[in-house]
Image (tube, helix red, strand yellow):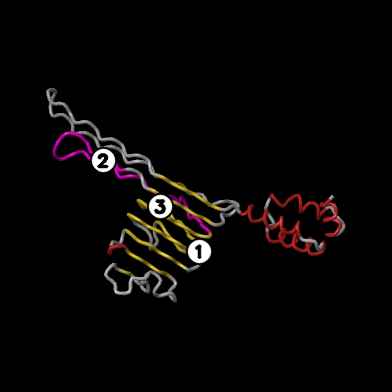
Amino acid sequence: MGNDRHLQRNDADYVLLSQIHKENQVLIRDGRNDSIIYLSTEDNLAIGEGTEFGGSHDEAYLYAEQVAVSGTFRLSHGIVSASRMSTLGEATFDLQGKPGLTPVEGADGTDGEDGGDFSLFIETAAADSPHFQMNASGGKGGDGKAGLSSDTKGGDGGNGGCGGNVKLLYGHPYLKLVAELRNIYQDEDEDDKVKKLIGILEENPDVALLEPFRQKLKDSASPETAMSSYRR
């Protein structure tokens, strides 16, 4: 992110997209590297283990054309919004709360932290949707301090943290195809209908939703006959 502009609260020009010719726009809140807003116009934004967005983030709000998740992406709160998403290996969004601690002073363990809040928006997911996991469980309560003798009671364990909130919204490619098929049906030009249908079939050779249409074309002597058969 050498070419990115990191905007601080005391900047005279406090505008996020002040450098609109840049591929990436970055806002680091209060100078904290673990709290970031990142807007990318690159073809692919890699996040997670082994990437520029590895490690752990307190808050992360990422907006990109496509996001590729590698291994575990750790954050406490945030949003990831992209047109498409792919995964490499065992991809995980980890928002698990930190566990409680056994006290140095006193007897009772401390409470675990609550899981984080996270929203994932994908405009169009692939038909074989990317496989990933989300973990927003609360942290384990800390163990109480052990008693020193039979006459000394040990401390109580801390409470486990509450689970976080996770939202996942994505558009399935079948929804787009249904809309396209509806538009074809409404076309009054029969030849144009056939051409558009053939185009969809060629662009989506392995989509089960289109199999009835594909079979109609195969069983007919011509595309025009296939369309007449389908309409009946």
Q: Nearer the viewer, mark 1 or mark 3?
A: 1
On the image, the x and y values in percent for residue 12 come to 29, 74
Packing grade of label 3 (10 A; few <14, some 14-19, many >=20) is many
Q: CA distance from mark 2 to mark 3?
A: 22 Å
17 horizontally vs 142: left or right: right
Which tag, 1 or 3, sits closer to the chain's start? 1
Looking at the rendered structure, the kind of residue marked 3 is: Thr
Looking at the rendered structure, the kind of residue marked 2 is: Gly
Which tag, 1 or 2, sits closer to the chain's start? 1
Q: CA distance from mark 1 to mark 2?
A: 38 Å
Tell me, for residue 138, which label it has, or none. none
Q: CA distance from mark 1 to mark 3?
A: 20 Å
Residue lying at 40% horizontally and 58% vertically, measured from the top left: 61
User: Can you identify the residue that label 1 sits on?
Assistant: 65
User: Can you identify the residue that label 2 sits on?
Assistant: 100
Q: Secondary structure at mark 3?
A: strand
On the image, the x and y values in percent for residue 111 come to 26, 39
On the image, the x and y values in percent for residue 141 come to 28, 37
201 horizontally vs 191: left or right: left
Q: Which residues are magenta?
A: 84-113
